[in-house]
Image (cartoon, rainbow, N blue to C red):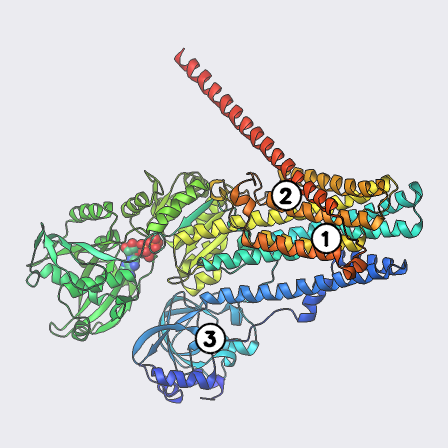
Amino acid sequence: MEKRQQSWHSMLNDEVLETTSTSLEGLSTEEAAKRLEMHGRNCLPLNIGRAWYVRLWSHINNMLIWIMLVSSIIAALLGHEVDAIVILAVIIVNTIIGYVQEGKAEKELQSIRNIVAPRASVRRNGKRFTVDAEEIVPGDLIVLEAGDRVPADLRLVHAKSLRIQEAALTGESVPVEKSTDTVEEKSPLAEQSCMAFSGTFVTNGQGTGVAIATGTSTELGRINTMLANVETLKTPLLQKMNKLAKQLTFMILAVAVLLFGAAYFLRGYDIADAFMIVVGFAVAVVPEGLPAVMTITLAIGVYRMAKRQAIIRYLPAVETLGSISVICSDKTGTLTRNEMMVQEIVTTAGKFTVTGTGYEPSGDFQQNEQTIHIKNEVTIQDLCRAALLCNDASLNHTATGWQVVGDPMEGALVVLALKAGFESALLKIQFPYKDGIPFDAKYRFMATLHHDPQNDKKLLFLKGAPEQVIAMCNTENHNKGEQPINTQHWLQYLEALAARGQRVLALATKTFDINKNNLEFDDTKNGFTLLGLVGMIDPPRTEAIEAVRHCHTAGIRVVMITGDHAITAKAIAQQLGISRDPKVLSGQEVDSMDDEMLRKAAKEITVFARTSPEHKLRLVRALQADANVIAMTGDGVNDAPALKQADVGVAMGNKGTEVAKEASEVVLADDNFASITVAVQEGRTVYDNIRKVIAWTLPTNVGEVLAIIVAVMFALPLPITPVQTLWVNMVTSVALGLVLAFEPTEPGTMQRPPRAKEEPIISLFMLWRIIFVSILFMLSAFGMFYYAIARNMPVEVGHTLVVNVIVVLEIFYLFSVRYVYGTSLTLVGVLGTLPVLLGVICITLAQVAVTYIPFFNYVFGTRPLQFLDGIMVIGTGVLLLLIIEVEKKAFRLLRSFILNSSRLVALKELYMRSNKRSS
Ligand code: ATP
């Protein structure tokens, strides 16, 4: 096995099999397990990206940290050693929290992504299995299909129209053709056409290869690049906040200089006190805890989505999800259950109903409600035989019942054939497979060539979209032989089945002489005999019906894009409630439109039928041209460009190809449309929570700063010392602010229209709220300090009162901010949530400690308070809550007044117009 890598491509197939001690049947399960132990898992060590010291430095090298550091030095120089040490300690703690937090969040994100780890198709014990790509061992026989990610380095032993995109390894952007022919030993990697390398993608065709290297022994492992690098935790929002912080820094510096000048020159503070005012200001203005809390809020959002089956691959998607205005979804499997059952078949002998449930292969064929014996019904026998032979699926009986391996639709055809009395294994021996053309959504059919020894012929079977297949036929199959086809008659049947929401397939056959062994695309052009139609039910998912309704109330348009027939698609769209009378556009019609026409049409169309993946890209662009924010689902290899173009690409975790997953921001672990809606809801919640965190944090800072400025204006000592400010900003702010990261979805979140993409995080209303509350904070803090001074209390007691009042205000404001618009004075609002209560208890205990424990009194310069003063502090908190409630009520009234008057204006206009018309 330890043969030099370069030699595999110059070896013959048999030599490869012999050297790797395997066969075309694959390894045995036991041997695979042994080799797994010997060679280890097929994965590369996680590339964490930046070195630890680079990451640590990025947390230290921050303007705000530098400001604090300078403040600490000034404090030390002025003889305030305790202050200097506390500031320094806060900087260190802050940096460590940020660093550890980022590392943890990165790891968690990675582990969430691993839920959708790549899978691979492997042949073991002569049977095909899908396994975790990490379980591949050298000697495994890997089956490749379009859309697969090559899981290990392979020496190909079978290749049919196989093309592989090797850009990741060779930089060559055009997919390369693969074959099984040996190449010269000295050939460079890019010319080793009989090899498939780990990490590259199959774009076309089929192939089988023997794994010759796994994990770090692969070419990819050698160059040591991880394709899916660990993502840094920077989202557009966090980047915007960082930029804002940088811009604010200069403003902060300017205000600090002004403040120093005002204190020293205008108000006559001595120079040391003036400097300490600047230190106090700098410490007050920086929201130290905010970045950590925002990152945690995002991380919690990702975790919540993962729990509900939506796996976020790129963090920025969490934000974008909240502003989605159109969801373009596939039909089969996403909106429907993808549990198919043949319900009706049509042959020249008439229409038959097939009974039974699920994939259980027992049921009858009925005509006009009478069970019929189909042994002598040649047309049905021929149809079912084709359905079983032109088929890649198989049926297994497991402990949980009958299960399909492969495409559920093909599974339903296997069940149909078994109901008709065929035996799968026997039929495949009687009619050995010779060659085939795999299904492709571009041409919507598949074909297989079989040997028919009894009649000394080759039989070609074709199944696919009825319009396509019917057009390729010139005869139809009758009990007594072939007759010219009556196309009109078949199209009528097709429409009737599709109108009932059935997915319809047509089957056809063609004979060749015995020497035909290879199938070319041209062989499928025409000359077929139509065997009949098959109608399958694929019921809508119940939860999708509900989810579509939620989308509509949330102002999100749902558009169905399907490869299925227009009439079937329309019927299913109606059943799902996408629209009562859906407007349908076919792929062909899309082709005939230019971009501008498509943009106009896309405004109204809710169903796009018989589309190929290429149409999706044009559709996304057309919808985006109208300022929509699009989520687009996809699973095939050709869906990748549209998934990349969409604002949020959503790939299917189960039926999706690796290419589609790689191109998407979100992967649905359960392939279910309802999970997209859940992700949108969580996206909105995360955004709301980040907003709440900001709206809650900033008034504390602004309030403190205003209190300092007012103190300078009245030539009073600082109402709060720098160390106390840090206590408030760092400790209480983080512990309480963090609570908001856990906030559940606010009622009404999915009843609002989507947020505009460019909407600033702090709306005008939010800005008003922050200023309003900041002023209330300032008035309370300053009022409390003035009260202490007026009563000749020691300045330390005044400081303690101020610290306590700010923390109490923070607690009461927390209850208020949990409901931005609605009232907080409800039972649910007052009781809060478990994190809220825990946060409040922790902070209260910490605050009691700071106020009453001598050690903390020493560090923070605080003094114990009297009971009545404590009551006054709490009373101020209650007052704040009530004032904000009054403000909320006033705004609600104002809003409904504006809404009503605009409605009135509209009504008046309507009335005037109708008056004009009637006169
Ligand atoms: P959706 O795009 O919503 O998943 P779909 O599965 O019908 O819908 P495609 O997979 O593009 O879309 O299939 C398009 C059509 O091709 C189907 O309606 C069917 O007529 C035909 N078809 C699909 N799978 C096969 C297959 N395995 N063999 C033959 N024909 C197929």
Q: Is mark 2 within 8 Å of ligand 1?
A: no
What percent of the width, then of the height, locates residue 332?
A: 33, 54
Residue 604 in the image, given as x and y percentages of width and height: 40, 38
Q: Is residue 910 above or below residue 179?
A: above
Q: In the rendered image, is residue 734 in sight?
A: no
Q: Which residue is mark 1?
A: 728
Looking at marks 2 and 3 on the same chain, the residue that comes earlier in the sequence is marked by: 3
The answer to which image quadrant residue 786 occupies is: top right
Q: Amino acid at mark 2?
A: Ile
Question: Could you tell me if the residues under marks 2 and 1 are in contact, i.e. CB atoms within 8 Å?
Answer: no
Residue shown at 47%/82% (left/top)?
40
Tell me the SS state at disc 1.
Answer: helix
Q: From the image, tell me which residue sits under label 3.
A: 197
Quarter of the displayed picture in which ligand 1 can be seen: bottom left
The reply to whether residue 412 is in sight is: yes
- Mark 1 nearby-residue class (10 Å; few <14, some 14–19, many ≥20): many
Q: Is residue 124 positioned above or below 510 on the image?
A: below
Outermost residue on the top side: it is 919
Up/down of 271 relative to 626, above or below: below
Residue 559 position within the rendered picture, expressed as x and y whole percent measured from the top left = 39, 45
**Nearest-to-viewer mark from 3 and 1:** 1
Quarter-of-image position of residue 650: bottom left
Tag 2 residue: 762
Residue type at mark 3 is Phe
Q: Earlier in the sequence, mark 3 or mark 1?
A: 3
Query: How many labels were placed on the picture?
Result: 3
Q: Position of residue 746 (x, y in %)?
A: 52, 45
Q: Is residue 913 left or right of residue 411?
A: right
User: In the image, which is nearer the foreground, mark 2 or mark 1?
Assistant: 1
Kindly report the distance in space between the C-alpha atoms of the residues bearing marks 2 and 3.
49 Å
Instruction: Count residues near mark 2 (Cα–Cα under 10 Å), then give few for <14, some for 14-19, many for 20+.
Output: some
Name the side, left or right, on which 626 lies relative to 21.
right
